[in-house]
Image: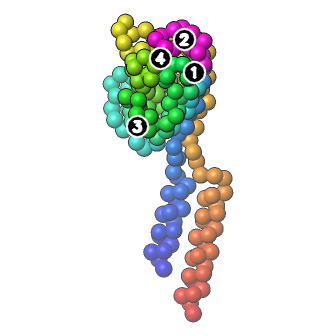
């Protein structure tokens, strides 16, 4: 009986304290031409990651900087660019990661490199919290790049348990405890 109470309390506290996956969405318009990306091309996408998986030291962003894998990613670009990404299983993705500066996306960025199906060059996309931290670079010499002329970010937001989830779980555990208590007294 005592072990059931301990297990139940542990499960309840775990559910209450779990922050979950962080999600971010972004959109904008590229300001200039870089390879198959043209001035005025619109883009939008989403990314998510598990903060618990962001553990690798990364020396190239504001210290302390850590990086790790994305849980999901999508990028919508004009079809003529050959750079849209439906999900992380796209075989043309060369690299993907999220980097957090001082544990925050404010000083961090998402980086994804993809080979274009149009010109076969690798393009590096960097999506940050602001325009100065956002760019697209064609990986072929002379490495033309572009930044957005307009850019918006929604998030990052954490997936937390739905309202009432913790209360429902605690109520259910209390009822199980009462039932077991009555059963054990018989």
Task: From this view, report whether residue 7 is shown above or below residue 74.
Answer: below
Q: Are marks 1 and 3 in contact (CB under 8 Å)?
A: no
Q: Secondary structure at mark 3?
A: loop
Residue 22 is situated, as x and y percent measured from the top left of the image, at 53, 39
Q: Quadrant of the C terminus?
A: bottom right
Residue 85 is situated, as x and y percent measured from the top left of the image, at 50, 30
Mark in the foreground, 3 or 4: 4
Task: State the separation of the CA atoms marked 2 and 1.
Answer: 10 Å
Q: Secondary structure at mark 1?
A: loop
Q: Are marks 2 and 1 in contact (CB under 8 Å)?
A: yes
Q: Residue at x 48, y 63 (%)?
A: 10
According to the picture, the residue beneath numbered tag 2 turns out to be 38
- Does the magenta-highlighted stretch encompass residue 148? no
Residue 127 is situated, as x and y percent measured from the top left of the image, at 50, 24
Mark in the foreground, 2 or 3: 2
Mark in the foreground, 1 or 4: 1
- Does the magenta-highlighted stretch encompass residue 34? yes
Task: State the separation of the CA atoms marked 1 and 3.
Answer: 26 Å
According to the picture, the residue beneath numbered tag 3 turns out to be 69
According to the picture, the residue beneath numbered tag 4 turns out to be 136
Most common secondary structure along the magenta stretch:
loop
- Relative side of 26 to 3, left or right: right
Residue 72 visible to an observer of this rendering: yes
Task: State the separation of the CA atoms marked 3 and 4.
Answer: 20 Å
């Amino acid at each position: 009986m005592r072990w059931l109470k301990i297990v139940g309390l542990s499960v309840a506290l775990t559910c209450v304290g779990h922050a979950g996956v962080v999600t971010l969405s972004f959109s904008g318009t590229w300001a200039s031409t870089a390879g198959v990306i043209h001035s005025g091309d619109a883009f939008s996408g989403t990314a998510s990651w598990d903060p618990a998986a962001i553990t690798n030291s990364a020396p190239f962003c504001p210290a302390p900087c850590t990086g790790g894998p994305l849980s999901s990613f999508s990028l919508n670009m004009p079809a003529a660019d050959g750079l849209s990404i439906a999900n992380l299983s796209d075989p043309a993705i060369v690299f993907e990661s999220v980097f957090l500066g001082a544990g925050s996306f404010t000083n961090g960025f998402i980086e994804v490199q993809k080979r274009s199906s149009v010109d076969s060059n690798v393009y590096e996309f960097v999506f940050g919290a602001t325009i100065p931290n956002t760019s697209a670079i064609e990986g072929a010499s002379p490495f033309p790049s572009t930044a957005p002329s307009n850019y918006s970010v929604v998030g990052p937001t954490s997936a937390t348990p739905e309202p009432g989830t913790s209360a429902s779980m605690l109520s259910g555990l209390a009822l199980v405890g009462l039932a077991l208590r009555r059963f054990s007294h018989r």
